[in-house]
Amino acid sequence: MATFLSPGPTRPSTATQEPEKEFNICLVGSGGVGTIAAVVLEKSGRARVTVVLRGSYGVVNEMGFDIESVDHGDLKGWKPSRVVPSIEEATFAPRTAHPTPLPTGAATPMESPRERYDFLVLSTKQLPDKYSLAQLVSPLITPGLTSIVLIQNGIFIHVPFTTLFPTNVTMSAVSMIGSFTEPPNKVKQIGPDILQIGAHYHPGVDDSVSAERTQTFIDMYVSGGAKSCILAPDMMLARWAKLLWNAPYNCLCALMEMTVGEIQSSGAREKLVEPMMREIVAIAKADGTKLTEDLVQEMLWRSPESSRYRPSMLLDREQGRPMEIEVILGDAIRKGKELGVQAKVMESVYELLCLVRWKSENPIEKGEMHIG
Amino acid sequence: MATFLSPGPTRPSTATQEPEKEFNICLVGSGGVGTIAAVVLEKSGRARVTVVLRGSYGVVNEMGFDIESVDHGDLKGWKPSRVVPSIEEATFAPRTAHPTPLPTGAATPMESPRERYDFLVLSTKQLPDKYSLAQLVSPLITPGLTSIVLIQNGIFIHVPFTTLFPTNVTMSAVSMIGSFTEPPNKVKQIGPDILQIGAHYHPGVDDSVSAERTQTFIDMYVSGGAKSCILAPDMMLARWAKLLWNAPYNCLCALMEMTVGEIQSSGAREKLVEPMMREIVAIAKADGTKLTEDLVQEMLWRSPESSRYRPSMLLDREQGRPMEIEVILGDAIRKGKELGVQAKVMESVYELLCLVRWKSENPIEKGEMHIG
């Protein structure tokens, strides 16, 4: 445990200088969810984790993360094995890692070895309307070798990966963690890390391989001290179930700038949340996943009546960050259209959230005209 | 014209003290629309107008209205024949109007005469969710005598009146005026006063009587110098046509806190406005009113592309006043339900606007919980 408390130096990536860990892992998206995942994976003792940091690289590289965690305690100045400022830097061993003069037999700067990652963990926000995450991280993926782990919101988020990387294992996780960042380098985990992880089976990879790699990742994650990490044998069921809560509550809270408790007290649970859930059930059914009435009721009534929970999209809106409209609402609606299932309430909420997005991207000063 | 420029004293209501005007009119709702209507009616020379003022009675009784009008010029300190602070005061001649000692033959204070109004003009906001306007103004209505004139938003707003006052003429006006108030006593009319007025025919009154009284009111209104006041032979068509613009644009602007131009530029015209218009067309059709495709296209494209117009409900929301959700959206949706016509986009927008209303009525302090 002590190793997690002291910030280590950025370690070079070549095998010659230290004992190899069992797995070489790259993690992109070191926010509330991702940083805790990095802690867990490093704590397992089986992984060497390279974390890609964009905005916060400078401060984290210098000071590490200051983490307060219900699962892992206080970790001041914590660093993973390596932090890098970009995907490019994660791809190649940094040239500065080679001491001068070069020891006999070491790789020369002219042939800096390409990293091979056993697992690529993606815990970024999902913003397919802004960029293609699968294309962005493609330099980190070795065909047939790197297993892709998506700890992210949405439904069908695996499709770009199984399409672009048809010979790679792709798995995803539904995460229930309560964790968020505070600039410049704080991570506060106030809710336990509870994950369900499952493989997205696809023709390019033997199912047995997908299952084995998924179980390996779960075992590693469990040994790293997560509160709970279990296999989801039917990953689409787990993702639809998560969406059943997320699509109505997350989207309505963001659109109306209301907490979950306010949505519930206002009558919107009956008027909007439940109709949206029924639309999700219909789309999931057409897509081959049955969501039971018990599950609908559980999701409808799961949150405490006066919950002050502000879901992720509301926090994003409040903090001027992009919202995950497409993966939490848009993709399900598009799947419904493809399968001939109408989802009129979801569609309206989606279009209105697109207006929120449009407004944030097109700020204009307020006029004074009142005439029509 | 000079009489409109000088604030007159509050005149007593008894006939013994001045020559009677042809029509005795009470006007309730002296906002941007109503105050200009009062000016027009007084300017016709045929009407003695009593204006009921609630919040602004004190200041207007003392100083009059300061009006800037594209139709009537600048009217500083303008007052109608009489201003009163309440419906009760409008109902009975104020006792203070009787000089002491009483002249021989005058009405005694013990038998202060009940007002009889030829026309009751209502230009308040329509808030059936807050109170019943028809019940509220019933003391001002003499059965079989007083004609009711509704210069208000909404559809089916005549129904409470034809129901409660089955022997009275009820007419309504669709107004296109651009006019608003500025506390404490300013009225700014920046768009010309263009009205269509038509009778709501109903079994308790001969159609010929309804038509005659409506034409009389129109003639008076025209002679008072309105920019345009014409008969709408099919008043429901005129009201549905107005709603065709109002329901989508007014409601979406209010819900999203966007101008008409922003709604148009954002893509919402295609994604939300037009679908809502199509729903209105379907409900109107089931209700017996045909709205043509030409009309839909006209309403869709009527406003200038970059219009900075902030419709009434948006202004209401911004200024913390109640919004006319029920008459602009709710009533049409309910009519659709009654007639078996679905209006899913309108329903969603309606429910979301109800949340805006709920929020304004249930303010709570922001929490800091982020966990789910």
Image (cartoon, coloured by chain):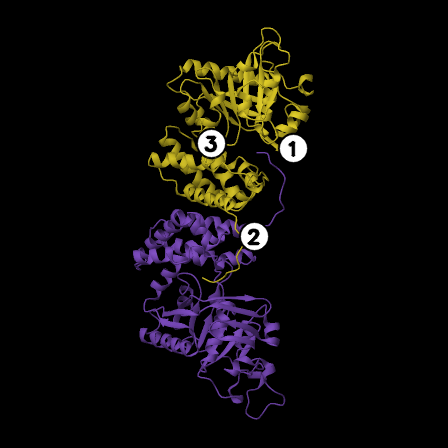
Chain colours: A yellow, B purple
Mark 1 lies on a secondary structure that is: loop
Q: Chain of mark 3?
A: A
Circle nearer the N terminus (1, 3)? 3
Residue A277 is left or right of residue B53, and the answer is: left
Whole-number angstrom distance, CA of label 2 to CA of label 1: 35 Å
Mark toward the viewer: 2 or 1: 1
Q: Chain of mark 2?
A: B
Please name the residue shown 64% across and 11% down the image. A101
| Category of crowding for the residue at label 1, using alpha-carbon neighbours closer than 10 angstroms: few (below 14), some (14–19), many (at least 20) | some
Question: Is A267 above or below relative to B227?
Answer: above
Q: Position of residue B237 (x, y in %)?
A: 33, 63
State the residue position of label 1: A184
Specify the farthest residue to the bottom. B104
Whole-number angstrom distance, CA of label 3 to CA of label 2: 32 Å
- Under mark 1, the amino acid is Pro
State the residue position of label 3: A154
State the residue position of label 2: B360
| Category of crowding for the residue at label 3, using alpha-carbon neighbours closer than 10 angstroms: few (below 14), some (14–19), many (at least 20) | many
Q: Position of residue A138 (x, y in %)?
A: 47, 23
Q: Chain of mark 1?
A: A
Mark toward the viewer: 1 or 3: 1
How many marks can you see? 3
Question: Is B164 above or below relative to B345?
Answer: below
Whole-number angstrom distance, CA of label 1 to CA of label 3: 27 Å
Mark 2 lies on a secondary structure that is: helix
Q: Position of residue B99 (x, y in %)?
A: 61, 87
Q: Position of residue B203 (x, y in %)?
A: 33, 69
Tags 2 and 1 both on a single chain = no
Specify the farthest residue to the top. A104
